[in-house]
Image (cartoon, rainbow, N blue to C red):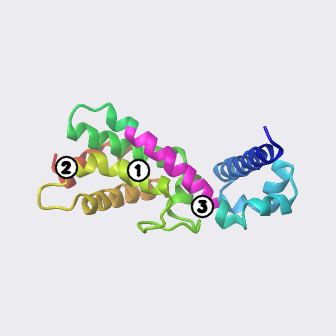
Amino acid sequence: MSVQERKQRERAERERLIVATARELAEQQGWDAVTTRRLAERIEYSQPVLYSHFRGKREIIGAVAVEGAAEMAVTVRAAASGANSPRERVAALARAYLDFAARNPAVYDALFRLDGGLAFAQEDTPEPLKDAFAALLESLGEVAGDAVDPGLFTEVFWASLHGLATLTRAGRLPPEDTESRVELLVDRLALL
């Protein structure tokens, strides 16, 4: 391995460490606790080293969001792949999405609430974000109906899931009724 390859590998490892540490700190204490000073202390590098990887907290949030989108896509696809019918796929997708949001609140915030400097639904949208949407579209597109654009249907269903995730987390919807909400969403919106 050349010196250049070793330096590139070490740089990539430091970047992964920064992102993992930011994510861990955000999950434990919230995004307000994530500062470049605290990250530098936790990873035992100087702030200038941290800034050589990310221009600031916004880019770190974006990196966590991209990583989280990839994980969400895997989670949703895995849940849907085990289902035997369109209705089961959509219900499994909905449950997996809501579970992901509940288990990973800081990642969910990085994806959908905080400014990570990422473009959504545009030409320059990062591939993991596009793939997360595609993971939803794969199951939802097949139940959109003949006269409905599958992408538009997926956006509306996703918006409904996002609303449920956000309102439940904020304590505005009781979590014990989540399954009933999923059933209602699948039966009425997806007409399954």
| Residue type indicated by callout 3 | Gly
Q: Find residue 66 and report its image quarter.
A: bottom right
Q: Which mark is residue 62?
A: 3
The residue nearer to you, when weighing 68 against 172, is 68
* Residue drawn where x is 79% and y is 43% of the image: 6
Q: Is residue 63 magenta?
A: yes
The answer to which of marks 3 and 1 sits earlier in the sequence is 3
Category of crowding for the residue at label 2, using alpha-carbon neighbours closer than 10 angstroms: few (below 14), some (14–19), many (at least 20): many
Q: Are marks 1 and 2 in contact (CB under 8 Å)?
A: no
Q: Are marks 3 and 1 in contact (CB under 8 Å)?
A: no
The answer to which of marks 1 and 2 sits earlier in the sequence is 2
**Residue 7: x %, y % from top left:** 80, 47
Q: Which residues are magenta?
A: 61-77
Q: Are marks 3 and 2 in contact (CB under 8 Å)?
A: no
Please name the residue that numbered disc 1 is placed on. 174
Q: Which mark is residue 3?
A: none
**Residue 81: x %, y % from top left:** 33, 34
Q: Is residue 171 visible?
A: no
Q: Find residue 120 and report its image quarter.
A: bottom left
From the image, which quarter does the N terminus lie in? top right
Q: Secondary structure at mark 3?
A: helix
The answer to which of marks 3 and 2 sits earlier in the sequence is 3
| Residue type indicated by callout 2 | Val
Q: Is residue 176 visible?
A: yes
The residue nearer to you, when weighing 9 against 128, is 9
Q: CA distance from mark 3 to mark 2?
A: 32 Å
* Residue drawn where x is 84% and y is 61% of the image: 47
Q: Nearer the viewer, mark 1 or mark 2?
A: 2
Q: Secondary structure at mark 1?
A: loop
